Amino acid sequence: MKLVETVNEFFAIYAKLDPTTKKTIEFQLVNRKNNNTVVAGLSSIEEARNKAITLTEKLEQATILENQKEEIANDDISDENTEENTNHNSQVDKNLTDNTIPDIKKDEKTYSPPRRSRYGK
């Protein structure tokens, strides 16, 4: 495999060479971050460039969509936090029915249930 061209920050074009004649058999499009072959069996450099451009556009669109999903998720979380802050009465009632210390909630990582004695005492 011989590096022919670096297309952009995502992809590079490699030529697969015949070991005996050293002639190019095919071109491969390779992910530059993890060196995995993305597309193999391309017949020309132009075909590899075009494929790299289309895949880059798809990656950029996927990144934009992922960022939008994260923003929506963050908005939902902030909405839930404001709802929790306005519902103080229901939380107090739950704590009164528990046999635990009201300052420690069960869902916190610091909560540990009472331990039993090894000998049943």
Image: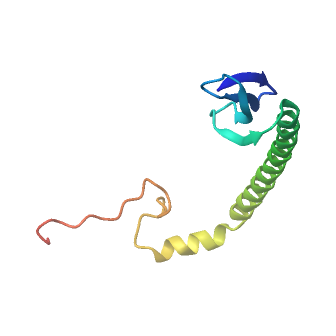
In the displayed structure, does residue 63 sit left or right of residue 38?
A: right
Above or below residue 68? Residue 60 is: above
Quadrant of the snapshot with the C terminus: bottom left
Image quadrant in which you'd find residue 14: top right
The residue lying at 66 percent from left, 66 percent from top is 88
The foreground one among 28 and 113 is: 28
Residue 92 rendering spot, x and y as whole percentages: 57, 70
The outermost residue toward the bottom is 97
In the displayed structure, does residue 103 sit left or right of residue 88?
A: left
In the displayed structure, does residue 63 sit left or right of residue 21?
A: right
The foreground one among 119 and 60 is: 60
The residue lying at 86 percent from left, 37 percent from top is 47
Above or below residue 103? Residue 10 is: above
The residue lying at 73 percent from left, 35 percent from top is 26
Residue 68 rendering spot, x and y as whole percentages: 83, 50
The residue lying at 86 percent from left, 46 percent from top is 61
Image quadrant in which you'd find residue 87: bottom right
Image quadrant in which you'd find residue 33: top right
The foreground one among 87 and 30 is: 30
The outermost residue toward the left is 119
Residue 107 rendering spot, x and y as whole percentages: 50, 62
